[in-house]
Amino acid sequence: MSILDVERLRGYRVPECRETYDARDTILYALGVGAGLSDTVDELNLVFERDLVALPTMALVLGTPGFWAMDPKAGLDWVQILHGEQSLRLHRPLESQDTLIGRTEIGPMADKGPGRPVMLRSSRTLVTTSGALVAEMTETWVLRGAGGFGGPRELDQEPRVSMPDRAPDTALDLPTSRQQALLYRLSGDRNPLHVDPGTARKGGFDGPILHGLGTLGVVARAIIHLCAQSDPRRLSAISVRFTAPVVPGDMIRTELWLEADGAIRFRATVPAREVTVVDGGTAELWQT
């Protein structure tokens, strides 16, 4: 990637997106994050229109034009972009069908130096047609090789979360399928990195990788089963740092630490490859 054209990016406006979704979209998203693949958890309410419940992480794909970095007007070398961090806070549980409006704002950037990455943060809100706030999201992208424009070296952020110095209190293994990225992309992120081997190699990978938000969806399902009696409506917030990609077909192990104050901390690994794919995770539940 060449040095980031900051003025061009600052002048770019991510299109506002009004989205109407229905039970079919809700089921497709759930399948895209692996619902129904495990033989140890019951997820019929995520994939069957009778008593259908939306996964809270579906908010991450609603009200968005998709992977907007692919728009040439943004001036980004999208093949060299990695998803670094993601947070989501819900102000009410998602409905299984609704009309929502998404508004995305490009935020601060940090320049790690010539030939090094730029860290780009953006935020998005989801509101109802009447203007009621449904969800707030922030994400950080790593723009590899785009540094050198002379900006600040760091983004303002909360201190990184570290895992407790003890064995996890509980854990759950959930599978992904070899088709996982092919399914997930139908919920809106059509980045060829996740389907085309040639694009993946240009991005520095051996083959297509799972979307970071697809990984987050799998991990959120694990938290819901381990901490919320399998009720997706109880998960109110989640935040993660992506540390390595998941390859479709990997088994993802989510390890949780349950703190005395009710806080949930977690990480996710792929045991077969001995790699941590999500770290510094935190989650919150609505109490019943």
Image: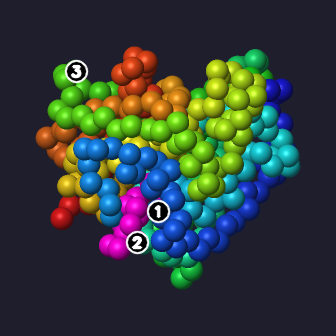
Gap in Å between the C-alphas at discs 1 and 3? Answer: 38 Å
Label 1 or label 3, whichever lies nearer to me, is 1
Q: Position of residue 177 (x, y in %)?
A: 48, 39
Q: Is residue 256 left or right of residue 193?
A: left
Asked whether the viewer can see residue 105, the reply is: no
Label 1 element class: helix
Name the residue at 35% across, 38% down.
174
Whether residue 38 appears in magenta in the rendering, the answer is no
Which residue carries the number 1 mark?
27
Label 2 element class: loop
Contact between labelled residues 1 and 2, with CB atoms less than 8 Å apart: yes
Which residue carries the number 3 mark?
165
Q: Earlier in the sequence, mark 2 or mark 1?
A: 1
- Quadrant into which the N terminus falls: top right
Name the residue at 19% across, 22% down.
166
Amino acid on which the number 3 mark rests in the picture: Asp
Q: Is residue 154 above or below residue 91?
A: above
Amino acid on which the number 1 mark rests in the picture: Ile
Amino acid on which the number 2 mark rests in the picture: Glu
Q: Is residue 240 above or below residue 94?
A: above
Which residue carries the number 2 mark?
49
Q: Residues within 10 Å of mark 2 (few under 14, many from 20)?
A: some
Gap in Å between the C-alphas at discs 2 and 1? Answer: 8 Å
Q: Quadrant of residue 155?
A: top right
Where does the magenta region start and end?
46-59
Q: Position of residue 34 (x, y in %)?
A: 43, 47
Q: Quadrant of residue 57?
A: bottom left
Contact between labelled residues 3 and 1, with CB atoms less than 8 Å apart: no
Q: Residues within 10 Å of mark 3 (few under 14, many from 20)?
A: few
Q: Quadrant of residue 231?
A: bottom left
